[in-house]
Image (tube, helix red, strand yellow):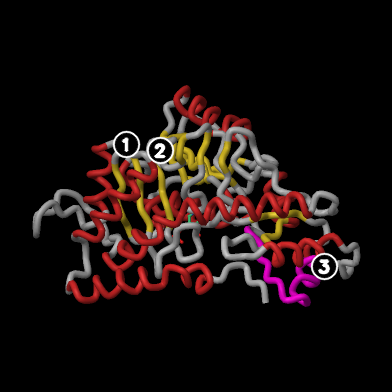
Amino acid sequence: MISLLDLNKLHGPIQKELDEAIHRVVKSGWYIGGEEVEKFEASFAAYCQVQHCVGCASGTDALELILRAYEIGEGDEVIVPALTWVSNAEVVKSVGATPVFADVDSSYTIHPGSIRSRLTSKTKALIAVHLYGQPCLMDEISKLASENELVVIEDCAQAHGAKFNGTKVGSLGHAAAFSFYPTKNLGAMGDAGCVTTNNKAIAEKIRLLANHGQTVRDVHVLSGTTSRLDPMQAAVLDVKLKYLDQWNAKRRENANSYLQLLAGSEVALPEIMKNTSHVFHQFVIRSENREGLRKKLEENNVQTAIHYPTPLNKMLFFGEEVSCPNAEAFGESVVSIPIYPSLSLSDLQTISELLLLNDLPSK
Ligand SMILES: Cc1ncc(COP(=O)(O)O)c(C=O)c1O
């Protein structure tokens, strides 16, 4: 079986280091905050070339904490791509604001022209999701945001280590949300996330919001919540962070192999934008006969997934339907095939050969 991701294979070579980190935390008797969390926050801030990293409980919480820190709420609109994970609209709803959906372009990231077309006097922020590991067009997005005084929130859940014009994601907007969900390029062993920013006041506010607005024991200065990164996850993440660049390089190498092996195939291959360093969280192809393609791969023991079948503009509980033709077309045709670092060239060849044979079962 070639699965979409095999964490045991990925962790195998570093199992000893992971076990040591976990046992160290177990033995410490200290399970909330403290040195392990501070150490990882410092390592990850340095990795992202930002001044502040604040750990929290998930990527979804990271996004919501940013919105709350910027006091985005009722009466405000936040522009969100239509093709993404559902969290991006949920968090906007959670703070009482309205998500407004913009279309994506052929790179699968939010299209600056579509953002412009959605601007109103109520627009306060936009969420730039670096989908599948490829950074958004951050120069154009930052320009239009500064012209319109918008807060730029990066969603880096799928893009740890990716770069735009040589600069790491997580440092390209006002604040950035990361998820460390176990399947991410940098994944914890449970739920975890963080916010990165160069804004000290925002970092301090997020730290307060994530811990009941408490400055010192029993002194609360604002109404917050419980959303902390715990020492066990921080210790695991600190070990795995050392391998992130090497794993991302392997993902890129796998992607290059696919691009060569699949050059003559009928599937649409990912478009790699110039000036970006893509980290291939997912390798996403498109097929008019997606179900036939998935069936064939499944029968040959290759796992696939769809990210994402229903664009958010079609989830009517988020608000009025708007048209996002690219996101809608991609929702019907995208399929993710295995790309994770421990795959061998022969795995990639097997998958490519299956895709090159022109014998898909009918729709
Ligand atoms: C693009 C994107 N944003 C946000 C999230 C939310 O992260 P979490 O699952 O840690 O809440 C995810 C995770 O799946 C994601 O892929």
Side of 273 where 119 appears, left or right: left
User: Callout 3, which amino acid?
Assistant: Gly
Give the x, y percent position of residue 285. 72, 54
Give the x, y percent position of residue 231. 26, 65
Give the x, y percent position of residue 131. 57, 49
Residue 171, numbered circle: 2
Q: Ligand 1 closer than 8 Å to the CB at disc 3? A: no
Where the N terminus falls, by quadrant?
A: bottom right
Residue 21 placement: quadrant: bottom left
Q: In the image, what residue occupies the spot 21% across and 66% down?
A: 32
List the residue tagged with mark 1.
Answer: 198
List the residue tagged with mark 3.
Answer: 292
Q: In the image, what residue occupies the spot 71% across and 56% down?
A: 334
Kindly state the secondary structure of the residue where label 2 is placed: loop
| Nearer to the camera, 221 or 264 | 264
**Residue lying at the far top of the rendered structure:** 147
User: Callout 1, which amino acid?
Assistant: Asn
Instruction: Answer with mark 1 or mark 2, whichever residue precedes in sequence.
Output: 2
